[in-house]
Image (cartoon, helix red, strand yellow):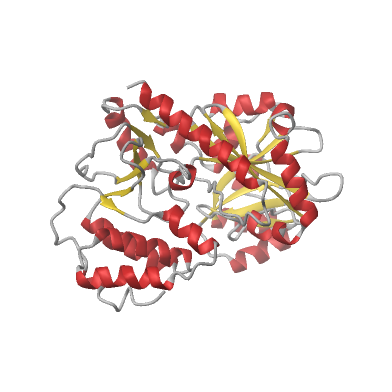
């Protein structure tokens, strides 16, 4: 993808009047499906680029260009395109059907992990998804007609003020609002979630501390400082920069020398640090589940299996290993009577303490049978993009998850 910066789109700015009507976009799910399916994205890009060159105020084209750029590895250019679009207009709609639900989603600028992935969750439905961009201290754009709303803003240092600013408005919003407890969303930082489950005998959420770089360096040098003072931590440790996702700069440091070496390769100012928990199964492999909690009911999104403790679906080699895909298929087919029953009390505790209509977790099972909680968030990617030829079992499981989410929306809208 080329031509955004030097192709005339940078002329788009805040000079055009905002008419208020939502702008129709192709949207994240449709474009991602095409990318995953190997469709040539260049014709789509060229069509969007022609639109922007003809009309620098075509905010919808700019928004879709931002998605395409991120999908093809140009994240910063993609976010730049998004900023240009939002300078022009704050409301975008991924159209469904005229008679479909109209879901207004409060969202914030950012990459694909900044907001709840509603476009993916609504796959196969006729819902009209309205992205309503909000910012701290910014006036609200004109509010389009809708049947219900959903707070899709994820937790981060950058969004806590935005979430706080939504609280008084949501109390008087004229339509039902899902995930309206913005204080709960704002408390889903890794350290806060760990503290929330401290002492639980059902959910193991390893004590996690947020510390500045100097404290980590001091601990690596002489074993003193804030790490011991706050969390009583010892080696081996898991360390990651605050704000990082998908394993970026995540490391397990077995000793002080390894921690010192890690700091030489990372320039972050703050880190999350936690004790390493060995969750290997009896066969020596590590298994990590992604589970969506929808109205208090758990639904499996995927099971990644790897030889390495740092498990992410994309790096676990599931596509290359038929045996592991078979295990995932079995886990999905038996989830309700298997994993969900084994950890019924733990999953109920999750939903009691994280009182939201929708959130997701990454979790595993410890050798002693507890639920090991890695992360809880409203913005984890939950999708059905994997090749059906390789992953034929995923379609039914994800359809079940998506149907449950749509049913939650329909029930909520019916209460209005």
Work out whether residue 413 or residue 181 is closer to the camera in this orientation and state it: 413
Q: Is residue 74 above or below residue 331?
A: below
Query: Would residue 386 appear left or right of 306 to someone viewing this image?
Result: left
Pick the front one: 317 or 325: 325
Of 179 and 368, nearer the camera is 179
**Residue at 70% of width from left, 56% of height from top?**
252
Quadrant containing the N terminus in the rendered view:
bottom left
Q: Is residue 70 left or right of residue 296?
A: left
Horizontal relation, residue 350 to residue 142: left or right? right
| Residue 79 visible in the shown view | no
Give residue 398's quadrant in the image.
Answer: top right
Q: Position of residue 155 (x, y in %)?
A: 45, 43
Find the residue positioned furthest to the right: 282
The number of numbered discs placed on residues in the rendered structure image is 0
In the image, residue 378 lies at what x, y percent?
49, 40
Report the residue at 23% width, 62% height from top.
58
Q: Residue furthest top?
A: 415
Which corner quadrant of the image does residue 173 belong to?
top left
Question: In the shown orientation, is residue 416 left or right of residue 315?
Answer: left
Q: Position of residue 23 (x, y in %)?
A: 26, 52
**Residue 266 appears anywhere in the view:** yes
The C terminus, quarter of image: top left
The spot of residue 344 in percent (x, y) is 68, 25
């Amino acid at each position: 993808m080329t031509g955004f910066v030097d192709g005339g789109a940078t002329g788009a700015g805040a000079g055009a009047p905002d008419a208020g009507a939502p702008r129709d976009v192709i949207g994240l799910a449709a474009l991602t499906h095409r990318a995953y399916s190997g469709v040539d994205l260049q014709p789509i890009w060229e069509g969007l680029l022609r639109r922007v060159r003809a009309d620098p105020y075509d905010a919808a084209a700019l928004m879709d260009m931002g998605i395409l750029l991120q999908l093809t590895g140009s994240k910063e250019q993609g976010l730049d395109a998004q900023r240009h679009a939002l300078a022009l207009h704050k409301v975008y709609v991924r159209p469904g059907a005229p008679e479909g639900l109209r879901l207004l989603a409060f969202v914030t600028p950012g990459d694909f992990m900044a907001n709840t992935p509603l476009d993916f969750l609504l796959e196969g439905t006729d819902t009209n998804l309205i992205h309503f961009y909000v910012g701290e201290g910014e006036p609200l754009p004109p509010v389009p007609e809708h049947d219900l709303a959903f707070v899709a803003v994820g937790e981060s240092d950058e969004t806590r003020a935005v979430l706080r600013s939504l609280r008084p408005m949501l109390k008087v919003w004229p339509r039902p609002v899902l995930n309206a407890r913005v204080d709960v969303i704002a408390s889903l930082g890794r350290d806060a979630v760990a503290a929330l489950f401290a002492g639980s005998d059902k959910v193991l959420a390893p004590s996690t501390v947020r510390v500045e770089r100097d404290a980590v360096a001091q601990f690596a040098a002489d074993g003193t400082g804030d790490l011991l003072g706050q969390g009583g931590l010892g080696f081996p440790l898991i360390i990651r920069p605050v704000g990082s996702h998908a394993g970026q700069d995540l490391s397990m440091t077995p000793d002080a020398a390894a921690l010192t070496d890690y700091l030489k390769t990372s320039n972050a100012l703050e880190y999350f640090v936690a004790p390493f928990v060995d969750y290997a199964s009896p066969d020596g492999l590590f298994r990590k589940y992604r589970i969506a909690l929808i109205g208090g009911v758990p639904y499996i999104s995927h099971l990644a299996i790897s030889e390495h403790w740092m498990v992410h679906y994309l790096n676990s080699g599931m596509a290359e290993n038929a045996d592991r895909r078979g295990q995932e298929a079995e886990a999905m087919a038996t989830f309700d009577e298997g994993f969900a029953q084994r950890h019924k009390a733990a999953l109920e505790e999750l939903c009691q303490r994280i009182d939201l209509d929708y959130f997701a977790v990454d979790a595993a099972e410890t050798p002693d049978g507890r639920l090991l909680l890695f992360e809880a968030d409203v913005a984890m990617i939950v999708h059905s993009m994997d090749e059906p030829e390789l992953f034929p079992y995923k379609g039914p499981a994800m359809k079940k998850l998506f149907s449950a989410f749509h049913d939650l929306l329909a029930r909520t809208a019916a209460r209005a």
